[in-house]
């Protein structure tokens, strides 16, 4: 084993043994990850089916007032987030510290601004890419291509707007960050930060369950993951996510309830494009200054070996097939 090479240098028997241990642990982690993702997907499907089948027996479901609106969002949060929190939490309970062990909290509050702009800009760009894909996929999906995700649950009153603001602007971001940038990303960091960010951002996009949201949520998830890694904590990602979603709900509210909707829409659109332009500048500066570079790359597992372990794993292939099928079905 002394003749083995790693990154162009000879490694000792001890390093070779450590490499074998890390590869074995990574294989196990990927198997557990794939199994838990399949379990979460199945749980969400079963709970959604039960809710649909027995909706007539549920209080307020058929009464479209503020109580039923609250109930719709409540059941949505329970179905979407509870299985993921429970299953992922139990599977990776040994890695639940909000900060990485032995590492200091490094995030500066001023960083929230450029990361928020990066999330906004990447989301807008990917949203337009999604619309272009929708145009190309019209022959497959028919009619207008991909569906309007929020069309059936947009608020129609001030009370409903407050409910949606709480559900989408606060509750959703907190739970999503605990799932994707805490339960999933943190244990994956042992095997490489960039890999952990990419895997969790893709899962974040897939679990939105439709092609309409996949690209822009995956892009946003990438920068939220970067923020969590740079800070050694999930807390900044939660703050950025809350700001982003609150702004989006506020944007919808302006368009729905403004007295002069045309003027308000023009002003809001101009402000949004100003954010995108600022975000584009931030992305260029961060790229030039290599702010996207992640230090932890796990020297014991070569990149080709990591890729082979992931893409040749039969459960990963099954997981990807299930997620893609669910995503297409929801579009």
Image (cartoon, rainbow, N blue to C red):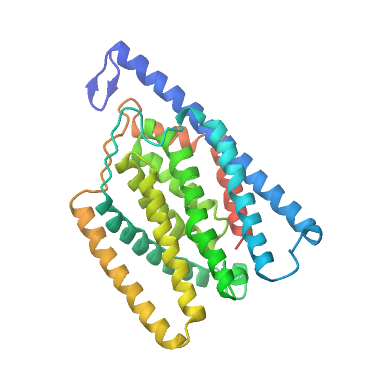
Q: How many numbered marks does the figure carry?
A: 0
Residue 80 visible in this rendered orientation of the protein: yes
Residue 114 x, y percent position in the rendering? 27, 57
Q: Which image quadrant: the C terminus?
A: bottom right
Q: Which image quadrant: the N terminus?
A: top left
Say left or right for 107 vs 306.
Answer: left
Q: Quadrant of residue 99?
A: top left
Foreground residue among 261 and 149: 261
Q: Residue at x 24, y 60 (%)?
A: 282
Q: Residue at x 38, y 78 (%)?
A: 268
- The answer to whether residue 228 is above or below residue 65 is above
Foreground residue among 14 and 226: 226
Residue 106 x, y percent position in the rendering? 26, 40
- The answer to whether residue 241 is above or below residue 300 is below
- The answer to whether residue 201 is above or below residue 281 is above
Residue 266 x, y percent position in the rendering? 38, 83
Say left or right for 311 vs 190.
Answer: right
Q: Quadrant of residue 247?
A: bottom left
Foreground residue among 78 and 205: 78
Q: Quadrant of residue 241?
A: bottom left
Residue 318 visible in this rendered orientation of the protein: no
Q: Residue at x 36, y 32 (%)?
A: 100
Residue sticking out furthest to the right: 57
Q: Residue at x 66, y 61 (%)?
A: 72
């Amino acid at each position: 084993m002394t003749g083995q090479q790693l990154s162009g240098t000879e490694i000792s028997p001890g390093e070779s043994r450590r490499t074998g241990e890390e590869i074995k642990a990574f294989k196990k982690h990927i198997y557990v990850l794939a199994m838990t993702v399949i379990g979460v997907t199945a749980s969400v499907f079963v709970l959604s089916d039960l809710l649909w089948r027995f909706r007539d027996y549920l209080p307020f479901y058929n009464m479209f007032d503020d109580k039923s609106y609250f109930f719709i969002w409540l059941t949505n949060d329970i179905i979407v987030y509870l299985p993921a929190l429970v299953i992922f939490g139990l599977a990776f309970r040994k890695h639940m510290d909000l900060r990485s062990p032995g590492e200091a909290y490094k995030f500066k509050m001023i960083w929230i601004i450029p990361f928020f702009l990066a999330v906004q800009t990447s989301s807008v760009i990917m949203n337009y890419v999604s619309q272009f894909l929708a145009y190309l996929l019209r022959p497959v999906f028919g009619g207008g291509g991909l569906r309007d995700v929020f069309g059936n649950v947009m608020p129609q009153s001030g009370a409903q707007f407050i409910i949606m603001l709480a559900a989408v602007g606060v509750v959703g971001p907190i739970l999503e960050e605990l799932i994707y940038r805490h339960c999933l990303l943190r244990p994956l960091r042992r095997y490489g930060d960039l890999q952990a960010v990419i895997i969790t951002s893709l899962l974040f996009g897939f679990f939105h369950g439709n092609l309409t949201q996949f690209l822009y949520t995956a892009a946003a998830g990438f920068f939220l993951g970067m923020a969590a890694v740079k800070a050694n904590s999930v807390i900044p990602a939660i703050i950025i996510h809350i700001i982003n979603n609150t702004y989006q709900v506020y944007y919808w509210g302006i368009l729905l309830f403004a007295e002069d909707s045309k003027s308000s829409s023009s002003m809001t659109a101009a402000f949004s494009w100003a954010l995108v332009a600022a975000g584009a500048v931030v992305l260029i500066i961060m790229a030039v200054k290599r702010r996207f570079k992640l230090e932890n790359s796990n020297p014991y597992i070569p990149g080709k070996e990591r890729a082979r372990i992931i893409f040749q794993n039969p459960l990963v292939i099954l997981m990807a097939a299930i997620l893609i099928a669910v995503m297409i079905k929801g579009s």
